[in-house]
Image: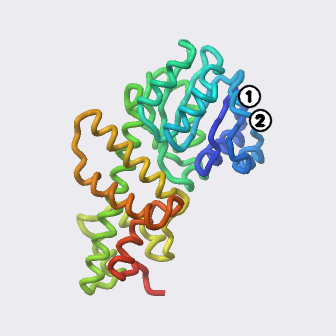
Amino acid sequence: MKVAFIGTGSMGGSMSRNLAAAGVDITVFDLNTESLKKPAAAGAKVAANAIECVTGADFLITMLPTPQSIEACMIAGGVAAAMKPGSMWIDMSTSVPETAALVKKSLDASVRVIDAPVAGMSVGADKGTLSIFAGGEPELLAEAKPLFDIMGDPAKFFNCGKSGTGYAVKLVLNMLWFDYFVASVEALVLGVKAGVDLEVLRTALVGSPANSTIMERDIIPLLRDGDYDEGFAVALACKDLKLAGDLARSVGVPLEVSGAVEQVYRRARARYGDKAGECIPAKLYEDDTNTPLRYAK
């Protein structure tokens, strides 16, 4: 079994490294040659270009940042046309069904397709404990499952249904996380401005019906260290919120709360730059209210 892996960034680098470390015959490629060092150190072969990477592969895994980059790689870059007949394309990017449909037009009719985006952040990619949300025919998912079990936690593998449903679950998940995060920051700033000690306030919320994973775990690095999580850029958060909005419009669902959250994220991106972390909207509230959300040292 030969695997091609295109997109070895903060997530894909660890995912492809874990495949190589498990003994998978894997060839990797990324436009950023520095990112290829991690999988190469674990035994992955490095291709000179994307076409070389996919040539002869039984599986192609893509882990790319945007639908536009998927189109550029697979269609304009000729990767789809170069895939071996009967092989399988597993797109683990956060994307949309429309992009996959465009790519399919450039694939040989015998090439099978799965969408399988992931969650778990870079730490989950590093440890091989990602959640995987897969859409496709059951027999195709079963064929790819050994690869998924290396990159993710088998207990967190979700068969989401027909092709495209993996994309949908991932967009809903990301949208809801951003919604929760902004609401959590608003709540903390309000409580602190009203005179409640930050640590007391968070502890009370964690022990209440208003608890969430964000309040219990994800927001701790921000409150303790001022970490706005630059491992996932605010530009990508804005991209995901836009894609969720596009999906909602395509199926006729109003997103009033998430639409407001998207504007908060876009305002934070405009103020602090594309590379600021996904938690940077908290700094908007901190700066605008002169209320730093930090535990006392």
- Where 225 falls versus 123 (above or below)? below
1 and 2 marks in contact (CB < 8 Å) = yes
Looking at the picture, how far across and down is residue 154, in whole percent? 51, 40
Q: Which mark is residue 48?
A: 2
Looking at the picture, how far across and down is residue 81, in whole percent? 62, 20
In the visual, does 105 lie left or right of 248? right
The residue to which callout 1 is attached is: 52
Q: Give amino acid for label 2.
A: Ala
Q: Residue at x 53, y 44 (%)?
A: 65
Q: Give amino acid for label 1.
A: Glu
Question: In this view of the protein, which residue sits in the foreground, 215 or 232?
Answer: 232
In the visual, does 13 lie left or right of 124? right
In the visual, does 265 lie left or right of 132? left
Q: Badge 2, how many Cα within 10 Å: few under 14, some, many 20+?
A: few
Quarter holding residue 265: bottom left
Q: Which mark is residue 25?
A: none
In the rendered image, is residue 182 in sight?
Answer: yes
Q: Badge 1, how many Cα within 10 Å: few under 14, some, many 20+?
A: some
**Is the image coloured rainbow, by chain, by secondary structure, or in one colour?**
rainbow
In the rendered image, is residue 155 in sight?
Answer: no
Q: Residue at x 54, y 32 (%)?
A: 71
- Where 1 falls versus 242 (above or below)? above
Looking at the picture, how far across and down is residue 117, in whole percent? 48, 39
Question: In this view of the protein, which residue sits in the foreground, 2 or 105?
Answer: 105
Secondary structure category for the residue under label 1: helix
